[in-house]
Amino acid sequence: MRTSIATVCLSGTLDEKLQAAAQAGFDGVEIFEQDLTVSPDSPEVIAARAADLGLSLDLFQPFRDFEGVDEAQFEANLRRAEAKFRLMGRLGMDTILLCSNVGTATIDDDEVVVEQLRRLGDLAERYDIDVAYEALAWGRYVSEYDRAWDLVRAADHPRIGTCLDSFHILSRGTDLSRIAEIPGEKIFFLQLADAPALSMDVLSWSRHHRVFPGEGSWDLTDFLARVTATGYAGPVSLEVFNDSFRQADTQRTAVDGLRSLRWLEANVAAAHVDSDQVRLDLQTLPQVAEPRGVDYIELDTDDLGALTRQIHQLGFRFVGFHRTKPHVQLWRRGQARIVVTESADIDPVSVDPDSAVPADATAAPAPASAVAPAPVSSGTHLRGIGFAVADADSAMERATLLQATEVPRDQAHDEEVLRGVFAPDGSEVFFGSGTGVDPTWTDEFGTVPDDRRSAIDHVNLAQPAHHYDEAVLFYTSLLALHAQVSNDVPSPSGLIRSQVMASSDGAIRMPLNLAPRSAESPETGSYPEHVAIACDDIFTAAATAVSRGLDFLPVPENYYEDLEARFDLAPELLQRLRENNILYDRDDVGEFLHFYTSTIGSVFFEMVERRGDYQGYGAPNAPVRLAAQHRRNAGH
C-alpha cells in the first residue's frame, strides 16, 4: 500500500516536512498550496528535493470555490485553474484536489455543475492533469460524497474523478453503502483522518480536531475496506488538521502518522478483504493478543528511603536486590510487583531500616533496562511498565514494524532476555511472556512467597500535551488495547482530560491524563502519575498502613457529609470510611473503595477494593483527590 501525507499535517518549513516524511518512510506527500507559497524555493527545486528524498508528489491541494457560479465568474475560475495547472507542471504533479464550492456558489443546478466540470476536464486534458472532486462537509450545495460522485459520473470526463475523504464523509454520518458503486479508477485520491466524538460545528471540528487513524472514535478499518473493495489502487494519504500536531516535533508527528497507516493497513488485511477488485497490496503485522496483565511497575528514585518506606507501608514485601545491579530492588504484594531503581548506585546495606527488609532477603537481577532511564523528569518517577503478553517475540516484532524505538538494555548471559520500547511520554514498555504464578525474571531477585490476592489494578499516566493522541495510538496499535470514552475531570488548576486504555477483560487499565499546563510543568502540567493496587479488604490494608505510619492523603469532612447525602450508607460504614480517609463510589453493579498516599516526586499510590462488577475508577471522587493534592503542593 502506497502511503502519503499532506504537508499540512506537519509543523515546520516545506523542506523540513519533506525530510520528515521521507525519514518516517512515507512514499509520497500532498503539497498544501500555502506551504509552497511561503517557501523560498522554486517549484523545480522542490520537485528535485522530493525526488532526492524518494518522495512522489501525489496531490496539489486545495483548489477552492470553482463550480456553481455564473459564466463571468466561471471564466475567471478557469483562468485561475490554468495557472495552477502550469504550476503543477513545474512541480511534476498530475493530480489536483477540487473542493466543492463553499464561498462563491450561487447556482444549485446539477446540469450547470456537470457542464462546468466537463469544461474543467477539457482544460485539464491539455495539461495532462487529473481533477479529484471532493465534497466538503460544509459545502454550500455539495456536501455529501455520493452527490459529488453523481456529478462526476454525469460529467463523464476521463480527467474528472472524485476524492474520498473519511472526515467529510464520517463527520456527516453519511450512508457508506454507495462507496461500492464507485469504480476504483474513478476514485482519483483517498484521504484519511480520524476524529474524537465531539458536538460542535463541522468546520471547527475539521480545522482543529482531526487526528490520525486509531486516535479517534471512527471505524476507519471498515471505511478503508470499503474503498479497497472498489479496486482503488492509488495512495492512501493522511490529511489531518490539528493544532497540536502543527506545534509538535515534525519528525515524531510523521512517524506517528505512518504508524497509524501501517496499523490500519494491517487491520484491513486481517479482515480478509478478498474481493477480486482489491488492488492495494495490504501488508499484515504480527498478531498480538491483549496483555494478560501488568507484570511489574518500575519506579526510578533519588529518594530511596521515602519511596521504599511508603511501599512497605502499603503491605509490600521486599524480595531482594538485583544480583548484579545492587541499585535495583524488587517488592511484591501478591501479584503486584514494583521494581525500584535508585538513580545513583548505593550500598545494598543502606536500605532504610524502617522499610523492615527481611534479614534473609535473597539478591537477584532487574527486569528493566540497566542503562540510563528514559528522558523523563528527575526525582521519583514512573520509569516503565512490564506487560505480561502471550508472545513477547511477536509483540516486539510488531512494535519494531510500527517504528517504536527499542530500549537499550544491558544484561548478563544468564539473565532473562527482556525487550521493550519507549512510549511517547519517554517511559519504557517491556514485553514479558513468563508463565506460572511468578515470571522467570523474578528468580533473579530471589524468592519471597506471597499468595495474597493483590495485583496492579490500574496505572494512571500523565501525557505531554503534544503527544497525547500519539499515546492513544501507541497503546492501541502495539498492545491491542481499546480507548474508552474520554472524560474531563475538574481540578483547582483547570480541567484534566482523561482517556482510559484498557483490555477487554479489564486486566489492563491505564488512564492517560492530559493536565493543564503550568509554569513549572509546561508539557504535562502539575498532574502526577500513580499506581493503583487492588486488595481484598480495604480496611485491613488501611489498618496495616496506619500501623506502619503511612501519610494518607487527607479527605475533608465535607466529602463525607456529601457522601452521606448521596448514598444510604450504614452509619458504621460511613464512620470507618471517615476514620481511614477512604473514598467511596457505587453504581448499579458494584462498589469501589479506595484511599491515596501522599506524593513522592511525581508518583503516588492508590489502594483499591472493587466489590461486585464495578469497572470504573471512582471518577466522582477525583476532584476531592486533586484538591487535596493541590493544597499539599501549596503547603496548606
Image: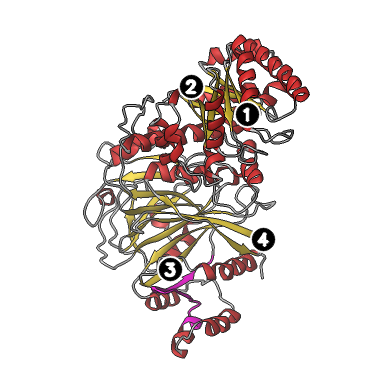
| Closer mark to the observer between disc 3 and disc 1 | 1
Give the residue drawn at x 47%, y 81%: 577
In this view, 341 is above or below 477: below
- Location of the N terminus (image quadrant): top left
The foreground one among 602 and 65 is: 65
In this view, 112 is above or below 509: above
Q: Amino acid at mark 4?
A: Ser
Say whether marks 3 and 2 touch (CB < 8 Å): no
The foreground one among 470 and 78 is: 78
Could you tell me which secondary element the residue under label 3 belongs to? strand
| Closer mark to the observer between disc 3 and disc 2 | 2
The answer to whether any part of residue 403 appears in the image is no
Q: Which residue is mark 1?
A: 111
Q: Quadrant of residue 360?
A: bottom left
Disc 2: CA contacts within 10 A as few (<14), some (14-19) or many (>=20): many
Q: Amino acid at mark 1?
A: Glu
Sequence-wise, the earlier of marks 3 and 2 is: 2
